[in-house]
Image (cartoon, rainbow, N blue to C red):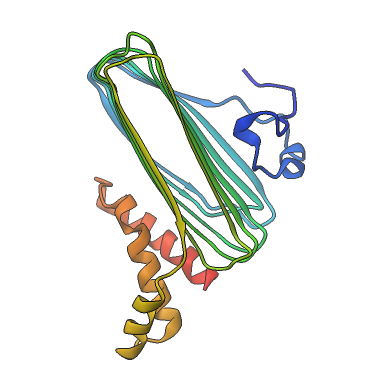
Amino acid sequence: MTSLTLPTRRDESWRYSDLEAVASVWPVPAPERIEVAAGDEIARVIVQDANADVVAIHDYVVVLGAGARATFHVLNTGGRLGRVTIDVTLHDSAHFELGAAMLGGGEQTLEIVTTMRHIEPNATSNQVVRSVLGGRATGSYLGKVAVARHAQKTDAGQSVKAMLLARTATANAKPELEIYADDVKCAHGATVGELDANALFYLNSRGIAPAEAKALLLRGFISGVFDDVADEAARASLEAAAGAALERML
């Protein structure tokens, strides 16, 4: 169902968004709903590379039956505002895996917002998000893990890292845990940094030009996000799109 009420910053999931851009396309279509039957498995690749003046909002609702698995890989690089939200409900022994990268520059606002709803025991989820931001870009990851009271043996992880190419860029990371069960493993880590000056110096001293050295380090920073894409053609396409986005930023 599509909400007609424009979001405000009181809504945590929109805290860092470009609400002026959001207003220009609101209301947005209802989320795409994906249901994975018990024991089934799906893989999904999402590339958000809209033109620079576009407001692109992509919403997904995923329901995983008992023992089902879903793997999502997301590359978020385009638009004035590029936003991808994924709301996942996990039943008994289901697993959800996310590998995502946000690459932005200029005045872009890029966002990935996830909610993992562990509603039954033994389900697992793992999220790896990498961001590279230059110019005056803002990149935000907001990830909530909600564990129901009877969802024992939940195992949920989040790893969020951002690389800033300019002091004027902004990275926001807000992992959130809401846990009502007592036998769970839920871990998260978030870091924001800059390119390693020593590594750049080393590469430069070996005759690698500064721009090429930066590109090598940044590709290494995000490379692991797409390593487990099973379809070789899809993986090559993702890596090529990510490489092109990085080149535009340098």
- Asked whether residue 72 appears in the rendered view, the answer is no
- Residue shown at the point (53%, 54%) measured from the top left: 77
The answer to whether 224 is drawn above or below residue 123 in the figure is below
Q: Position of residue 118 (x, y in %)?
A: 37, 19
- Residue shown at the point (65%, 21%) measured from the top left: 2
User: Dividing the image into 4 quarters, which one contains the N terminus?
Assistant: top right
Q: Position of residue 180 (x, y in %)?
A: 40, 14
4 left or right of 129 in image = right
Image label count? 0
| Quarter of image, res 185 | top left
Q: Residue furthest top?
A: 150
235 left or right of 176 in image = left
Between 233 and 224, the one nearer to me in the picture:
224
- Residue shown at the point (73%, 40%) measured from the top left: 19
Between 226 and 162, the one nearer to me in the picture:
162
- Asked whether residue 114 appears in the rendered view, the answer is yes
The answer to whether 98 is drawn above or below residue 201 in the figure is above
Between 94 and 162, the one nearer to me in the picture:
162
Q: Position of residue 222 (x, y in %)?
A: 37, 58
Q: Position of residue 167 (x, y in %)?
A: 60, 66
